[in-house]
Amino acid sequence: MAETRIARADLEPVLRAHRGNQDLQAAFEQAREPGQLLSVLGRYIQFNSAFGAGLANLAGEIAARQGLFRDAREPLKIVADRAAEVASDFFFAAVDEFDDRATPWRDTHRTLGQATLKGFGAFFGYTPGQLNDVVRINAATEAAL
């Protein structure tokens, strides 16, 4: 069985066609007032809230499929499974999602995003109650989640 490798060149057409970063930048640039900026930021933070959990799940799904990543050069078939090694890269990315290790306390990326939104709101003079009226998740964000 030939070994399959994916290189950046293989992904380049997909990455080139993906417009997520450009669309996000355009949304921020089109936000002409604080409320619009806060709304875009809130939707972005909410959209990203699913990634940590998805990443942790992906690590488990990969690790559980021992037939998925096999080392064809390993003559002892029962130890040719490399799913755990592949999953470990995803697992450690999930660890980073769930704990900003630059601080002594646990800061998840979600917590940092929420603090950013609250800080922006305070900077622009919004109370939490006012932010509830400004930051609303639209149907497109709900559908993406």
Image: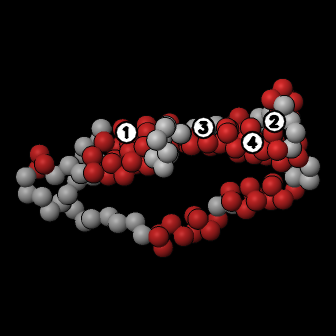
Q: Quadrant of residue 115?
A: top right
Q: Quadrant of the N terminus?
A: bottom left
Give the structural element (helix, strand or loop) at label 4. Answer: helix
Mark 2 vs 3, N-terminal side = 3
Give the structural element (helix, strand or loop) at label 2. Answer: loop
Q: Are marks 4 and 3 in contact (CB under 8 Å)?
A: no
Measured in 3D between alpha carbons, the distance from the residue under mark 2 to the one under mark 3, in whole angstroms, is 17 Å
Mark 4 vs 2, N-terminal side = 4
How many other residues sit within 10 Å of disc 2, few (<14), some (14-19) or many (≥20)?
Answer: some
Badge nearest the viewer, 4 or 3: 4
Mark 3 vs 1, N-terminal side = 1
Which amino acid, by three-letter code, is at mark 3?
Answer: Thr
- Which residue is label 2 attached to? 135
Measured in 3D between alpha carbons, the distance from the residue under mark 4 to the one under mark 2, in whole angstroms, is 13 Å
- Which residue is label 1 attached to? 61
- Decide if residue 48 is on the left or right side of residue 87: right
Q: As drawn, which residue projects farthest toward the left? A: 76
> Which residue appears at 20% of the width and 49% of the height?
81
Measured in 3D between alpha carbons, the distance from the residue under mark 4 to the one under mark 3, in whole angstroms, is 12 Å
Q: Which mark is residue 82?
A: none
Which amino acid, by three-letter code, is at mark 4?
Answer: Gly
Badge nearest the viewer, 2 or 3: 3
Q: Quadrant of the C terminus?
A: top right
- Which residue is label 3 attached to? 111
Q: Which mark is residue 119?
A: 4
